[in-house]
Image (tube, rainbow, N blue to C red):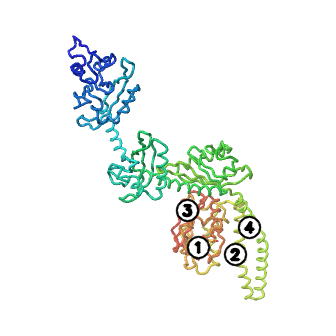
Amino acid sequence: MVSESANSARPVGGKMGALIQGLDWSATPLGAMESWPQSLRMIVDLMLGAAHPAYIVWGPEHISLYNDGYISILGTKHPAALGRPYAEVWPEIWDEFKPLIESTMAGEAQHFLNQPVPLKGRAGRPMSWFTYSWTPVRDDTGGVAGFYCSATETTEQVLAEESRLRLAVDIAELGTWSWDIASGEGEIDERGAEITGLPEGKISNFWETQLSLVHPDDRDHLQAALARGMQGGHSFNLDYRVLHPHGGVRHVAARARIVTDGAGKPSQLVGATRDATAEREAEASLRAARDESERWRQLYETVTATTPDLIYIFDRNYRFTYANQALLEMWGQTWDEAIGKGLLDLGYEPWHAEMHEREIDEVIATRRSIRGEVSFPHAVLGPRIYDYIFAPLVNANGEVEAIAGTTRDITELRELTRQKDEFIGIASHELKTPVTSIKAYAQLLHRQLSRAGESAPADLVAKMDAQLNRLTELIHDLLDVTKIEAGQIQFNDDAFDIDQLLDEVVAEIRPTVDGHHIIRQGRAIAPAWGDRERTGQVLTNLLTNAIKYSPHTEAVILHAASDGQEITIGVQDFGVGIAPEDQPRIFDRFYRAGGPERDTFPGLGLGLFISAEIVRRQRGRIWVESVPGEGSIFRFTIPAVGDDPVAGFGATTQAT
Ligand code: ADP
């Protein structure tokens, strides 16, 4: 029962306590208060004392009672609602609530969380949300006669939550839509419309309209995804492309959720849609880039796997990060066993590992490739000779990131070269004896013919002798090369008068040339230190070349000078000259410069090679300066004896 408390400022039960007290209940189906069952009185008492909004439904007519907290929920329905049947108080929700009220009256307690209830009579609130519990209450007869409802309004929280959600949808740039499956009608917001190409707002054939915009290649798979999703349950993804009315292809990523009716049958789809165009295009270009690099990788892989050369990559810590098939085979290891290991781990001897590590350091420091040759035993093939190149792999910051290496087995090449040298040696040696004999016979014949006054045949024999001299020179050159290769060339070092040697060589050459003048400029004065004969050979080579390669000019200048330490000899012509790309190679064995006139000049490409070897052995240098079409000047140095620094570019002597 409602009781008064003497020391309370506010009547117990508040406003509603007073109203309930004051109402003439006998005019209601509940009858006068005194006749109420004990349990009803008790829960009314409980309700009026409660701090939360509470409501009581009592009797077969569902008569309503409520407390102060509930007044705001009733809005304009208060105070008329007191003592009225539930159906009259809440006609707007009666249909929906009736079955629930019935099951509560049948004894089943109910609990609802954040339930939307479209209550009327509340200003500016088309929808309200509540968390509420219905507890069945029995009367004195033991049957359920009504229920006690405690309710908490959660509209504020739900709306706040909803606006947070809307914000999230906004930030995520999501479009939202809903589609009523039975009627086929759907609705999409502005952003959703922009993404999917659909018109904003209500659309009568929602799904068909969307399908008509879908890229033809994606239609079947989209239909299938929808069917699968509807069977699968709660929510699912739909990814498809649309041919957008604004032009271009857009990628749409939608997340759909199934809403079911009371019978658990899907009635509606609601969803959020995202524009995934940029993302898909980025994925596609990434895929394309990956495919492209994979293609290149396969290409390189094929090349490196099939070459007999060894191809590998070291990191900066001398560890192998790549080794091709040939190298793995040489090691007798698998990729997994070998990769990541260093030279020592892979069985290289310490001197060998150490050497390569220093070379790697050098490549890192200089960012330049290095080339070397090394001989070591192959696991299967025995001792081999290898030619290798280490090249820097420089990253975008200009740092050496790794070192790429290639190694070629040149054992066979070396062997072939050796055989060729051996053959040249034997052949020229074998040629030398008969040519010497023929020359002796020719000289004998010449003497006899001259004596007999047979001048015409004697001249012919003299020409024969001159050709035999050329042949002898070629044979000597070939023999020299063989000796140089074998390291067998003999040097008789001594001090000699180089100016005198120059005079002699010039005098020797003079009878063999027509139309060229050899002009002498300067004198060395100081004696030279070296092999006189070999130095003469160098001079002869340079002078005959100068004459040979200047068919249209006459002058050849022979320079001599000394700085006291060394003597520099220069042979200058004004002939065909040498192209810059040939200049570094003309001192190589058998190298002959290219160009249209090459075959008009006889030669084996040995003279400069032999000259360079001789000069080098005498601790001198040899080099060329040349301009094609203008001429060349070859210079070499030879050590001077004594410390007499007399430069001799003064006098010019015409020697021929
Ligand atoms: P070769 O027997 O061919 O003359 P060399 O070793 O003496 O052989 O010279 C090598 C090459 O250098 C020649 O083939 C020629 O192309 C070039 N060469 C040498 N000397 C001259 C020069 N004075 N002028 C132009 N080219 C020259």
Q: Amino acid at mark 2?
A: Arg
Read off the residue under disc 4: 424
> Can you say whether 171 is above or below 143 in the image?
below
Classify the position of ligand 1 by quadrant: top left, top right, bottom left or bottom right. bottom right
**Of label 2 and label 3, which has the lower sequence position?**
2
Q: Looking at the rendering, in which quadrant would you find the N terminus?
A: top left
> Can you say whether 53 is above or below 356 in the image?
above
**Of label 2 and label 1, which has the lower sequence position?**
2
Q: In the image, is 180 to the left or to the right of 606? A: left
Callout 2: helix, strand or loop?
helix
Choose top left, top right, bottom left or bottom right for residue 245: bottom left
For the residues bearing labels 4 and 2, Cβ distance under 8 angstroms: no
Residue density around tag 2, few if under 14, some if 14–19, many if 20 or more, within 10 Å: few
Q: Amino acid at mark 4?
A: Ile
Q: Nearer the viewer, mark 4 or mark 2?
A: 4
**Of label 1 and label 3, which has the lower sequence position?**
1
Q: Is mark 1 within 8 Å of ligand 1?
A: yes
Where residue 312 appears, as percent x and y from the top left, is 61, 51
Q: Amino acid at mark 1?
A: Ala
